Image (tube, rainbow, N blue to C red):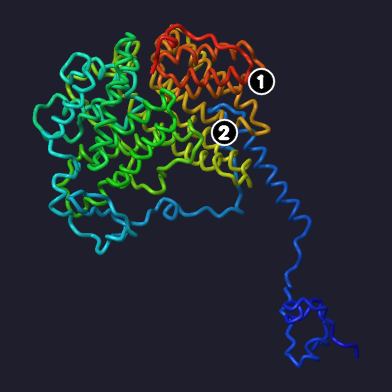
């Protein structure tokens, strides 16, 4: 009778990497007087070629579907998706399992601790100070902490520093600066809540939760960059230096919402004038301080046991501030090519809603956002646009994680997913927020909507620029950027272009230059030159681009005379 012979080596020979006779026992185990064991062999049948071919066909079908969706218009995409039948081989999750959220446990609820020197700060579930949860807020948190020094002392210090820099806090220049800020900068700096700031600004009492001297100075610095007169533009640097002096001396020791906002204004100013390292540091301080104050957690989570601390208005304002910081974090990170700091997965803040307008807001509305062609108020576009910026910033966060990662495994697949998310974002835009490059030149442009689409197409360009099959997508977006710039330039002037325009124009220039289109390249270089009257960064970008393209810059007289 022939001796049994196994298909695989015994366990001991496999472990010791010895040649096994595959007998029972094998010669190695027998000579060593060891137990000889064989692992149980799988009786699973091999996968058939027919099954493999079926899977390959299924993958090819999905790839074809994605390509059709990418090439289709929004209405055509809806029609395509209506005809899609995934079959019964995919078992959908029950809606209750997908949409159901776990209730916020007391262990993960927000917790504020009164630290040394009476400062109140946020401590998460792993903090060294977390000994108990679910307790009512301590008395030190009523009213909700702003961690500011006393109002009178703070204002006296601000006035003294302002005088040292030749600034009259009660002069007409302050009002003019604020009007420029809210007209041109506010729709892109909505980490400040306009109505609450103005109410506190015009209030005479000392307890002003959403106003501070450094914040006023920092906002004026940004506002004056949009001033038409050169002498007013030059004053912006004094306002910046005054705000910086106060914040670095006292702001770091007294974290507050207004300090976060002021540091973020300084960050945008620094980046705008080409001081990228300084802007990055100021923004880092702002975002870390915001986390220290706990604005990444929705107030409703820690207000369950005590609703006397914040009003409904305060809650909405804190939500607005968080999402404004979140968007700014993504824009700054994308402009500098660095990973973002704030992550939506680490936050539990609900999407902001629109609060009722305060009376007397006519003088503080954004440009071209006051009335539409029929004379109806159009300011309601501001919050829907902001909400769509939030959704776009979430896609930006995932894109930055992918593009800033040194791990390139499966990058192409991830970029395809992100492109699909961008298509979906564009499809769900409200009709009032659409951009149509075929509009008549006489149709009034809304700067808020123009900036929203500039951000969208900037992201689309950087996502597809280096992909082997992304040239057409990038070039299409670059030409839409040019169309936005042309219309904005003719109606508003690029001297009033928002911050994101500099980045969008730079990325579009990179695309058209690599595509060998000299006319569009020259137009975008000229656009950067005009933007540099307000944002000196645009001039540096143009100079860098011209150096790469071996051309000589033709600088505007205004830029040579001095911009920020």
14 to the left or right of 540? right
Disc assigned to residue 515: 1
Q: Quadrant of residue 374?
A: top left
Residue at label 2? 463
Residue situated in front as seen by the camera: 396 or 58:
396
- Binning the other alpha carbons within 10 Å of mark 1 as few (below 14), some (14 to 19) or many (20 upward) gives few
- Pick the front one: 148 or 354: 148
Local packing at callout 2 (Cα closer than 10 Å; few below 14, some 14-19, many 20+) is many
Q: Residue at x 22, y 18 (%)?
A: 166
Q: Where residue 70 appears, x then y in whole percent?
A: 60, 32
Please give the name of the residue rendered at 41% of the width and 35% of the height, measured from the top-left corner: 280
Residue 359 as seen in the image, left or right of residue 34: left
Q: Residue furthest left?
A: 205
The circle drawn on residue 380 is none
Residue 48 horizontal/vertical position (percent): 77, 59
Please identify the residue farthest to the bottom as the structure is shown. 33
Is residue 140 positioned above or below 312 on the image?
Answer: below
Which quarter of the image is occupied by the N terminus? bottom right
The residue tagged with tag 2: helix, strand or loop? helix
Q: Nearer the viewer, residue 310 or 355?
A: 310
Q: Is residue 315 left or right of residue 187?
A: left
Expressed as whole percent of the image width and height from the top left, the position of residue 20 reads 82, 80
């Amino acid at each position: 009778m022939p001796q049994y012979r196994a298909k695989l080596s015994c366990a001991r020979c496999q472990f010791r990497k010895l040649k096994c006779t595959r007998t029972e026992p094998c010669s190695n185990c027998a000579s060593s007087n060891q137990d000889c064991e064989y692992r149980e062999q799988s009786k699973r049948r091999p996968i058939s070629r027919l099954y493999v071919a079926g899977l390959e066909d299924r993958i090819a079908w999905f790839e074809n579907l994605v390509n059709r969706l990418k090439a289709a218009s929004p209405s055509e995409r809806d029609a395509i998706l209506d005809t899609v039948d995934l079959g019964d081989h995919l078992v959908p999750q029950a809606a209750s399992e997908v949409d159901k959220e776990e209730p916020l446990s007391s262990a993960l609820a927000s917790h504020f601790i009164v630290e040394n020197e009476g400062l109140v700060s946020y401590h998460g579930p792993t903090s060294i100070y977390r000994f108990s949860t679910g307790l009512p807020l301590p008395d030190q948190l009523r009213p909700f902490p702003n961690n500011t020094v006393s109002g009178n002392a703070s204002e006296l210090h601000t006035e003294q520093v302002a005088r040292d820099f030749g600034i009259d806090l009660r002069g007409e220049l302050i009002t003019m600066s604020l009007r420029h800020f809210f007209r041109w900068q506010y729709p892109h700096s909505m980490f400040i809540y306009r109505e609450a700031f103005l109410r506190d600004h015009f209030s005479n009492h000392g307890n002003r939760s959403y106003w501070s001297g450094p914040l006023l100075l920092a906002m004026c610095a940004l506002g004056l960059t949009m001033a038409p007169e050169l002498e007013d533009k030059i004053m912006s640097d004094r306002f910046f230096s005054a705000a910086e002096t106060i914040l670095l001396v006292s702001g770091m020791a007294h974290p507050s919402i207004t300090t976060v906002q002021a540091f973020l204004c300084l960050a945008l100013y620094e980046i705008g004038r080409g001081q990228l390292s300084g802007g990055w540091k100021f923004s880092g301080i702002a975002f870390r301080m915001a986390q220290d104050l706990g604005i990444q957690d929705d107030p409703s989570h820690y207000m369950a046991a005590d609703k006397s601390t914040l009003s409904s208005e305060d809650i909405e304002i804190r939500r607005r501030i968080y999402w404004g910081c979140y968007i700014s974090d993504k824009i700054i990170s994308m402009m500098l090519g660095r990973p973002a700091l704030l992550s939506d997965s680490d936050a539990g803040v609900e999407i902001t809603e629109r609060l009722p307008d305060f009376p007397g807001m006519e003088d503080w509305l954004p440009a071209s956002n006051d009335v539409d062609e029929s004379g109806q108020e159009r300011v309601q576009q501001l919050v829907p646009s902001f909400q769509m910026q939030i959704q776009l910033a979430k896609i930006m966060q995932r894109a930055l994680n992918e593009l800033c990662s040194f791990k390139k495994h499966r990058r192409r697949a991830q970029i395809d997913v992100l492109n699909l998310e961008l298509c979906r974002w564009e499809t769900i835009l409200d009709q009032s927020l659409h951009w149509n490059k075929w509009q008549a030149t006489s149709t009034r442009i809304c700067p808020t909507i123009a900036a929203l689409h500039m951000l969208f197409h900037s992201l689309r360009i950087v996502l597809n620029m280096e992909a082997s099959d992304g040239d057409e997508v990038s070039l299409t977006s670059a030409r839409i950027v040019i169309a936005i710039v042309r219309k904005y330039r003719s109606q508003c002037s690029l001297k009033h272009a928002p911050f994101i325009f500099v980045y969008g124009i730079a990325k579009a220039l990179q695309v058209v230059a690599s595509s060998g289109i000299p006319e569009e390249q020259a137009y975008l270089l000229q656009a950067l030159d005009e933007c540099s009257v307000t944002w000196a960064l645009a001039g540096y970008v143009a100079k860098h681009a011209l150096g790469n393209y071996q051309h000589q810059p033709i600088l505007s007289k205004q830029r040579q005379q001095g911009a920020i």
